[in-house]
Image (cartoon, rainbow, N blue to C red):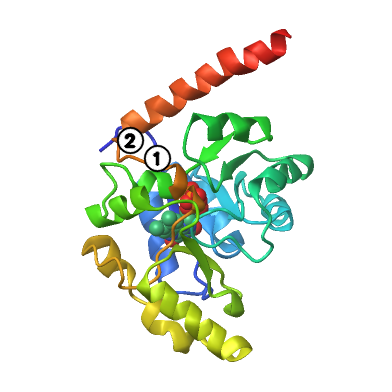
Amino acid sequence: MTDKPFGVNLTFLPTVSSPDYPGYIRAILDGGIKAVETAGNNPQKWLPALHEAGVKVIHKCTSVRHALKAESIGCDAVSVDGFECGGHPGEDDVPNFILLPRAAEELKIPFVASGGMADGRSLVAALALGAEGMNMGTRFIATREAPVHENVKQAIVAASELDTRLVMRPLRNTERVLKNAAVERLIEKERALGAALKFDDIIEEVAGVYPKIMREGAMDAGAWSCGMVAGLINDVPTVKQLIDRIMREAEEIIGQRLARFAAR
Ligand SMILES: Cc1cc2nc3c(=O)[nH]c(=O)nc-3n(C[C@H](O)[C@H](O)[C@H](O)COP(=O)(O)O)c2cc1C
């Protein structure tokens, strides 16, 4: 779909020794991928092969201490995900208005802001808080090209900023998801079982549900990641329309609103 360079996400599940990872790394190298966003676990083991091939590694972090660790092992950049993000926000619950400037205070390598980013306002704010740019998860899913069922896109458009829930906190695997019948059931189990909750208790709501939701559009099939930023998403544009709009809005804010401020 593009002749421009692009990056891929490589999420290390808790089993870092998964036999699949060498295959993923090989596909990245053979595919001529220029940048990889690693997430979920320490990517150190895979850095030499990726770097040798000239691949830039951006590690996704939800805390300053993890970002500093990524810097110390040689990652090229980090993506800093605040508490508002869709997916796994970690366990510290620090929103981006605090997390990004804290990251800027501590890091030497560049970082992008992630979590809650949707439009030109987000981009200008991210730059103001010290980031070099922004990453968008939920916003990109509600685009024409995103290879997910139309029901998913419409669910994001319909959702407000109040419609996400945090699940799996008792397992220290917190995930921000869109509320639905399965999520309500999952939360009820978490309430009832408290500290005794095991992964097996909620397996029906979280394991193997993505294909049903994303491909078949079965919106109540389980818990799926979605950010609070859904409250700012009201349409399903093409990626080009979205990016052009973001850049236009950002330029307007900087050239007019912020320029007026600077001229006072
Ligand atoms: C449906 C969905 C699936 C995601 N899956 C992954 C994943 O497999 N690995 C990962 O590192 N991040 C994953 N994320 C998180 C995004 O990469 C990104 O960090 C996050 O969505 C940013 O927050 P935002 O949704 O507010 O933009 C997912 C997010 C969503 C919404």
**Image vertical order of residue 198 relative to residue 129, above or below:** below
**Image quadrant in which the C terminus is located:** top right
Q: Residues within 10 Å of mark 2 (few under 14, many from 20)?
A: some
Q: Residue at x 54, y 89 (%)?
A: 192
Q: Quadrant of residue 139?
A: top left
User: Horizontal and vertical percent for residue 125?
Assistant: 61, 33
Q: In whole angstroms, how far apart are the C-alphas of marks 1 and 2?
A: 14 Å
Q: Residues within 10 Å of mark 1 (few under 14, many from 20)?
A: few
Q: Residue at x 63, y 87 (%)?
A: 195
Of 48 and 137, nearer the camera is 137
Residue at the disc numbered 1: 6
Of 207 and 38, nearer the camera is 207
User: Horizontal and vertical percent for residue 155?
Assistant: 32, 55
Viewed as shown, does residue 171 lie left or right of 248? right
Query: Identity of the amino acid at label 1?
Result: Phe
Q: Is residue 114 visible?
A: yes
Which tag is nearer the camera, tag 1 or tag 2? 2
Q: Quadrant of residue 40?
A: bottom right
Residue at the disc numbered 2: 239
Q: Residue at x 44, y 21 (%)?
A: 248
**Image vertical order of residue 173 relative to residue 45, above or below:** below
Task: Determine whether the residue tagged by mark 2 lies in a helix, strand or loop.
Answer: helix
